[in-house]
Amino acid sequence: MLRYLLIRALSLSLSLVVASIVIFAVIEVIPGDPAAFMLGLNATEDAIANLRAELGLGGSLVERYVSWITGMLQGDFGTSYTYRVPVGELIADRIWVSLPLAIFALILSTLIAIPVGIIAATNRGNGGDFAIMGLTQLGIAVPNFWFAMLLVLLFAVTLSWFSAGGFPGWDNPGPALKSLVLPAIALALPQASILARVMRSALIETLDQDYIRTARARGLSRGETIRRHALRNALIPVLTIIGLQFSFLLAGAIIIENVFFLPGLGRLVFQGITQRDLVVVESVTMLLVFAVIVVTFLVDIAYAIVDPRLRRK
Amino acid sequence: MTKHLRLSAAVLALTAGAAFAQQSTITIGMQLEPPMLDPTGGAAAAIDEVVYANVFEGLTRFASDGSVVPGLAESWEISEDGTTYTFTLRDGVTFHDGEAMTAEDVVFSLDRARAEDTTNAQAALFANIVSVEAVDDTTVVVTLDGPDGAFLFDMAWGDAVIVDPASAEGNATNPIGTGPFRFVEWRQGDSIELARNDDYWGEPVALEGATFRFISDPNAAFAAMMAGDVDAFPVFPAPETLAQFEGNPQFNVLVGSTEGETILAMNHGSEALQDVRVREAISHAINRQDIIDGAMFGYGTPIGTHFAPHNPDYVDLTANSDFDPDRARELLAEAGVENLTLRLMLPPPSYARRGGEIIASQLRDVGIETEITNLEWAQWLEQVFRGYDFDLTIVSHTEPMDINIYARPEYYFQYDSAEFQSLMDQLNVETNPEQRGALLRQAQELISTDYVNAYLFQLAKTGVANANIEGLWENSPTQAIDLTGVSWTQ
C-alpha cells in the first residue's frame, strides 16, 4: 500500500515539474506586451518603457522561470501586472467562490446521479431505464451555458426568486449560498448525466458477474446483493469520473462564471489572458494543475480503500 | 376612534413604504472591470468610467456636452502671449483622507505626469509644460513652451487629475481623490463600491452610494437589467436587445454620441496603399450604412473624416467617399492594380469583427481580396499598432479631439504629410477660437481628400437605465460615468 502510494506520489510530482515548464513556455511566447496594453493607443514609448521597468518585465526566459518557481515554492505567486496586488491575494479571493461552487455542484451531481444510475441499472430494459437514458442523453447534449441562461430567464427574470448573478461575499452566508444555487445546478446537470450513465453501466456489468449469481444463490435478497457486493465493485469507475469531474468543475466553470458574473478563478484567468497579465495566468494555471494532481492522488487513495486488491499490490 | 387610528396607521404605513421605495443608491453595470483605479497610470476606459468626476477631479473638467468647465480651479488667467496660465484654486477642498488640497498638490500631480519616469498613458498632454509653480496655497502658475489652444481641454482629461503625494502610490487599489464620492471597497471580479463624500467642497450629490458591477457576457447583462439587479448599464453590450427595452416603460434607452471615430485604417507603409487611387478606391467600395446596420444594429453616424459630428467644427465630408463601386473599379484600373490581396487585422470589438466581414465582401465586389486575421487587443497592439505589420485594420479612436494623430508620421497608419503637419503646428499655437475652427476644418478636408483612411462611422453610445433615473450622461465626451448629477425621480 505504502509503496503504491509512494510511486503514485513520485509520478505526480514529476507531472507537476513538466506542467510548470510547459505552462511557462506556452504563456511566455504569447505575443503582446502587458505595459503597452495598459497604456493604450496614445502612450509614448518612454512611458511604456518606464512601466515595463516598473513591472519587472526584464531578464531572460530562464531567469524569469527560475524566479517564478522559487517564488512559488516559498508561497509567493508574484504581483499581478494589471491589478498591482499580490497574485496570492487574488487567488485567495477567487478560490472562495470557485471551490464552494465546484463542491456544491459535485455534491448535487453525485446525489442525483448515483440513485438515478442504480434505478436505471436495476430496471434495465424497461420503461424507467429508457426514460432515464433519454433524459441523461439530453442532459449531456444540452450546452450548459444555454441551460444556465434558461435558469436565469425563468428564476431571475420571470419569477424573481434569485438574482441574475453576482456574488455578495461570504460575509452574508445566506445570500452567498443562494447566489451559487443556479450556477451549481447549471454545472451539475451535465455532470450528473454523465455520472448516472457511468453508474448504470458499471452496475450492469457487475450484476452480470458470477459472484452476484452466487450471492443470490446463497439466499441474499436482490437489494442486499446490490448493496453488499455489486455497488462496491461498481464504484471504481464512478470514483474515477467524480475525480475528473471535480477538476473539471474547479477549472472549467469559466463559462458558467461568465453567465452568472461570478468572480471565480476561471474569469480571473480569462481576464489575465486578455490583459496579458502573465503572472496571474501562469500562477492560476499552475495552481489548477496542482489541484488536479492532488485530486487524482486522493482518488488513487480512494481506489485503494474501495478495492483491497490494490492495497496488496 | 379606532377606525380613525387604523386609518392613520395605514397612511403612516403607506408613507413609510413610499419613503422606503425612494432609492438613494444606484447599481451601475459595466462590461469590463478596470484593471486598477489610478487614472494617471493606465489607458483602460473602465478606470475613468468609475473614477472620473466621481472620485478624482482635475483643474478643469468635461461637462456632459463636451465643453470644458472649471473643476478644482475656479478660474484662470492666460497671459497675452498664451504661454502662462495662472490658476486660482477653490478654497477648502480636501482629499478623502482629510488632507487639504493645495497648490503644492497641483505642482506634484503635473510634475509627476510629465516626469522622466512617468507611466502616464497620455504623457503627451503634458509635454509642452515647462514649469509648474505654487505661488500661494490657492494659486498655481503653469508655464508652457509656446501657446497651446488646447491646454485647458487637455487638463480636463482623467489622466490629468490632481492627486495627493501621500496617497498617489496607492491610488491603483485605494483611490483617494477630491470628488463627491469616496472609494469604499473593491471586490475584485465582482464590483466596486463608492459612498457619498460628506465633506465635498461643491454641491453635494443626490446619491448616497453607487456600486459598479462587472458583467462581461451580453446575455448576462440583459438578464441582470431585466431582473433589476442593475439599475443602469450606460454602455450596454447587447445592442440587439435594445428594441425590447424600448418597448418597456420601466426602462429608458439612452442613445448618444461618443468620441469614437471608427475607421478602416490603411498602412501607408504597404506598397499598394501608397497609391492614393487605391486608397480612394477602397473608400468608394465601402457602403457605410450596410456596416452600421449589419454590425451596429443601426446605431452610428456615418463620417467622412476623422472628427466627431457633434463638434461645432465638424464638416460633413462623406460625399468625398460615397458608396460607388464602379468608381472604385475605375480607380483600381487607373492605378493598374490587379489581383490585389490585403491583410485585414481585426481586434475583438464587434464593430471590428462584424464590420470586417462586411467590408471584406464589399471589397471583394470591386476586385480586392482580403485575408482576415482576428487578434486579441494585446496582440493587435504589438503587431498592428507598434509593429506596422498589417495592410488594413478596423479600430475606433475614442480619444476626444485626436485629429492631431495624423501629424505623427510614426503613428501606426504612417501618414506623412508636411502640409498636414504644418496645419497642426499652426493649430497648436492658435488660441483664437474662430481661427482654430478654420484650421480644424482645413485639416478635416485634407485627410478626407487624401483618403488617408476609410472613415466609417462615429460609434454610438447605447445605454439602458431604469426609467426612474435621471441625470445620466447621454453622450460621452470622455469615457466617464459621471454620477454627480444622477438621482431617482421616485
Image (cartoon, coloured by chain):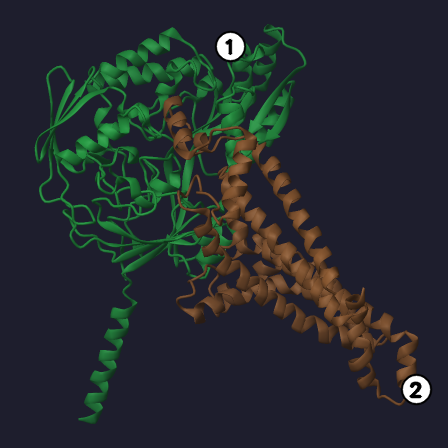
Identify residue type, mark 1: Val
Label 1 neighbour load within 10 Å: few <14, some 14-19, many 20+: some
In-image side of B178 versus B88 (left or right):
right
Q: In the depicted view, which residue is nearer to us: A105 or B200?
A: A105
Quadrant where the N terminus of chain A lies?
A: bottom right
Q: Chain of mark 1?
A: B
SS at circle 2 = helix
Residue A175 image position (x, y, % from top left)? 44, 69
Residue B220 image position (x, y, % from top left)? 51, 54
Residue B266, placed above or below residue B416 = below
Residue B467, placed above or below residue B163 = below
> What residue is rendered at 42% in x and 37% in y?
B460
Identify residue type, mark 2: Ala
Q: In the depicted view, which residue is nearer to us: B377 or A310?
A: A310
Looking at the rendered structure, the number of numbered marks drawn on it comes to 2
In-image side of B401 versus A167 (left or right):
left
SS at circle 1 = helix
Q: Which mark is residue B276?
A: 1
* Chain given the colour brown: A
Say which colour chain B has: green
- Residue B70 visible here: yes
CA–CA distance in space, label 2 to label 1: 93 Å
Q: Chain of mark 2?
A: A
Q: Are marks 2 and 1 in contact (CB under 8 Å)?
A: no
> What residue is rendered at 47% in x and 33% in y?
A34
In-image side of A186 versus A221 (left or right):
left
The residue pinned by badge 2 equals A217
Residue A204 sits in which quadrant? bottom right
Residue B418 image position (x, y, % from top left)? 38, 7
Q: In the depicted view, which residue is nearer to us: B190 or B268?
A: B190
